[in-house]
Image: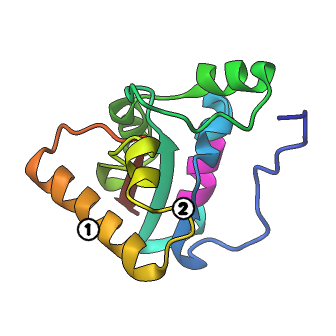
Amino acid sequence: MRNRTLRTVIPFREGSFDLVTCMMGTVNHLSAAQRERFLAEAFRTLRPGGLLVVSAWDPACRFQTFLSFYSPAEMAQLRSRLTERELLRAEFTEAGFAEARATPFCTSPDWQVTGAGAAGTNADQLARLVDLDRDRTAHDPTAVGQMFLLTARR
């Protein structure tokens, strides 16, 4: 996480998109002020009824291994920016989004996934893992995963 200039205004007119995404926990690399600017731009560039989809690392997860490829300094900085799902959901609402909803995913520890043969798997095996994850969260809405998916409408 080197210091880079964060582009906070994108060159698109208001209401240009039906969908804006921010995936793979990228939102966790943003400070609170940067997230506020990101949400404002996402809101501005979405059409009415458009969808914002964001995946974020869940600080409530006890079995998270997502940071294994970062240096200790990068891990500390990223961990300091993890935001609880309800707080991030509230930021979406404050930015004007409606129907903000957080859904956990990656609810199994990596050892269970790799133990199930996910390393080098084919699409059918990965689809089964997704189904298992969806079944778990359907039966236990309080389940915690390594990540959560936030969705909201403009």
Look at label 2 and name its amino acid.
Ala
Residue 47: x percent and y percent?
49, 75
In which quadrant is the N terminus drawn? top right
Q: Nearer the viewer, residue 65 or 138?
A: 65
Image position of 10 (left or right of 88): right
> Magenta region's main secondary structure?
helix
User: Closer to us: mark 1 or mark 2?
Assistant: 2
The amino acid beneath tag 1 is Asp
Residue 120: image quadrant is bottom right
Q: Is residue 29 above or below residue 135?
A: above
Q: Is residue 147 shown in magenta?
A: no
Horizontal side of 13 relative to 149 (left or right) equals: right
In the rendered view of the protein, which quadrant contains the C terminus? bottom left
x then y, percent, for residue 134:
23, 61
Label 2: which residue? Answer: 119
Q: Identify the residue shown where x is 44% and y is 42%.
A: 111
The segment highlighted magenta reads 37-43
Q: Earlier in the sequence, mark 1 or mark 2?
A: 2
The residue lying at 55 percent from left, 67 percent from top is 20
State the residue position of label 1. Answer: 131
Disc 2 residue crowd, few under 14, some 14–19, many 20+, Cα 10 Å: few
Is the C-beta separation of discs 1 and 2 under 8 Å? no
How far from the left and from the top, in percent, is residue 131? 26, 68
In which quarter of the view is residue 5 placed?
top right
Q: Residue at x 40, y 40 (%)?
A: 109
What secondary structure is marked by label 1? helix
Estimate how packed mark 1 is, as few (under 14), some (14 to 19) or many (20 or more) residues with alpha carbons within 10 Å.
Answer: few
